[in-house]
Amino acid sequence: MSQEAVYAKAGFGQSVPRGRRPAVVVVDFSYGFTDPQYPTAADMSAQIAATRQLTDAARARRFPVIYTTISYQPGEVEMLSWLKKAAGMRALLKGSRLVEIDAATGIQASDPIIVKKGASAFFGTTLNALLTGAGVDTLVVTGATTSGCVRATVVDAVQSGFNVLVPADCCADRAEAPHLANLYDMQQKYADVVDARDVYRWLVEL
């Protein structure tokens, strides 16, 4: 039996409904992930450009656009278990350029920025409250990395009651294999993995 048949037999891979009040969450397109001069980063220019089309369209329709960044106080670095495993993240210190949102994203002064300490944009943050207060029913999740913070955010979004779309060409990772594997798994279990063109068309037609 093929992999696709195994998942289909188990009932995975169904389409999620799309609501009338979306928001775009841009996960960790900060310089620490997008500027290849840093060891934790990779060239994500194409994914940033594709994401910017969606954020511009969302703002034009007055839908929320929210950014996230990972940022630590120096005293937190030795206390957090994640930083023992992912030691490269220790460089993401408050006040450094690495934690600033990449200007190429087109971020606006009015866009909320969620500062997080771990992978998920929901864990220990005000994201759920912001989305609920704005009446959001569907999340478009973009950003970096596909296998890390994007996936964790998508899983928590579903567990928080949101329908989720993941435009694959708006997500980036440091290597292709984990990128593709996690897109596949999210499509089967948590979100509709689509492309930026599909999401753009949907946003402008709402």
Image: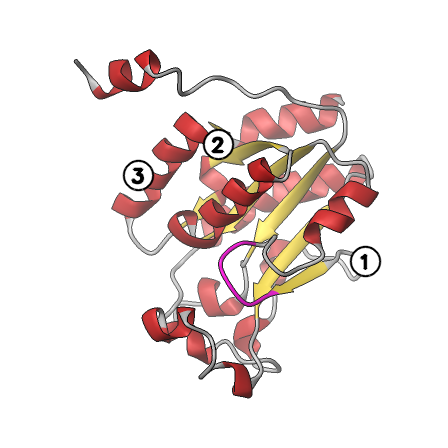
Nearer mark to the viewer, of 1 and 2: 2
Residue located 55% across and 67% down the image: 117
Nearer mark to the viewer, of 2 and 3: 2
Q: Which residue is mark 3?
A: 181
In this picture, residue 95 sits left or right of residue 1: right
| Location of residue 188 in the rendering, given as x and y in whole percent from the top left corner | 40, 26
Q: Residues within 10 Å of mark 1 (few under 14, many from 20)?
A: few
Q: Nearer the viewer, residue 20 or 34?
A: 20
Q: Quadrant of the C terminus?
A: top right
Q: CA distance from mark 1 to mark 3?
A: 35 Å
Q: Which residue is mark 2?
A: 190
Q: Which residue is mark 1?
A: 110
Task: Magenta stretch: give its range.
Answer: 116-120
- Mark 1 and mark 3 lie on one chain; the one further toward the N terminus is 1
Q: Within the image, what quadrant is residue 139 found in?
A: top right
Q: How many marks?
A: 3
Residue 6's place in the image compared with 194, above or below, is above
Q: Nearer the viewer, residue 135 or 93?
A: 135
Residue 94's place in the image compared with 139, above or below, is below
Q: CA distance from mark 1 to mark 2?
A: 30 Å
Q: Residues within 10 Å of mark 2 (few under 14, many from 20)?
A: many
Q: Secondary structure at mark 2?
A: loop
Q: Amino acid at mark 2?
A: Tyr
Q: Amino acid at mark 3?
A: Ala
Q: Secondary structure at mark 1?
A: loop
